[in-house]
Image (tube, grey):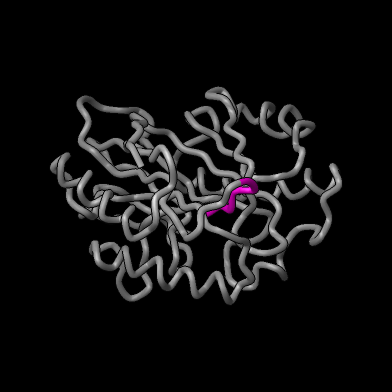
Amino acid sequence: MQKKRFPSGQYSYLPAGFQYSSGVVAEPGYGIERARFSRPVPLSVGFQRIQAHLAALGRPSEALCACELRSPAVMNESEFIAFNKVYVNYLAQMGLYENEVNPVGRCNLIPAVNPPAEPSLYAFSYTVPVDGPSTVPDFVTSGAAECPDRPGYRDGIVRLGETTPDALGDKLRFALGDLESRFEIMGVSWSDVSDMNLYTVHDMHHLIEQELSKRDAINGGLCWHWVRPPVLDIEIEIDARKLSRTLFLPA
């Protein structure tokens, strides 16, 4: 995997499937801001809000670099593909998706309590100009799970169907290794992370010190979301980022 530039958005990305990239890195002279809604909003409304927000900042639509979604229920792979085809149409309308090339990073989770009635937008990130040089670029990774990020997820799931403490440890180590491989390409490290997110309904307290603290991964804290990954039989997801600013928007 190699980084590819997306010049009109002022960032580079790590190519993945048609539905998302594996991560994004701001180009020199630019940082990444994140905006989170007070409550998830339906995708159609959410993308209208994104465009209005970017226009108010004087930023082009192509500045959008990552989306955080919340969906009603876990999907099998065929349902996941069908959903993704709908999702990328919104990106295409913004000039961000063409010929199955998608620079925008993403996570998509299923709340264990009070899930939305329809696929919704929880938060989004975008590039902005910044003053002064930065030794470490802002970046956002997409969610990493306990299987390779490619079709046929179930065939590659680490310890499929197991949720014992030992199995969860193997799953987390796989996901962290995936993130580390992305970090190497992006030119960043664990010590650069400002926000770490863990997505699971399983008890993983025993792994915070064993796997996260020893990596210097949670200097900025750990946000644990009580959610499920979007694809059936995947138990955990994790991502990381370094941002210039986070702001909150009304639903």
Of residues 17 and 200, the one drawn nearer to the viewer in this rendering: 200
The percent position of residue 62, horizontal first and vertical second, equals 24, 55
Stretch in magenta = 108-113
Instruction: Name the dominant secondary structure of the magenta segment.
Output: strand
Q: Is residue 251 left or right of residue 188?
A: left
Q: Is residue 141 left or right of residue 154?
A: left
Q: Residue at x 52, y 73 (%)?
A: 81
Q: Is residue 152 left or right of residue 66?
A: right
The percent position of residue 114, horizontal first and vertical second, equals 58, 47
Q: Residue at x 56, y 51 (%)?
A: 115
* 59 w.r.t. 192: above or below: below
The percent position of residue 138, horizontal first and vertical second, equals 37, 36
Q: Quadrant of the C terminus?
A: top left
Q: Is residue 179 left or right of residue 241?
A: right
The percent position of residue 97, horizontal first and vertical second, equals 31, 67
Q: Quadrant of residue 59?
A: top left
Q: Quadrant of residue 93?
A: bottom left
Of residues 122 and 57, the one drawn nearer to the viewer in this rendering: 122
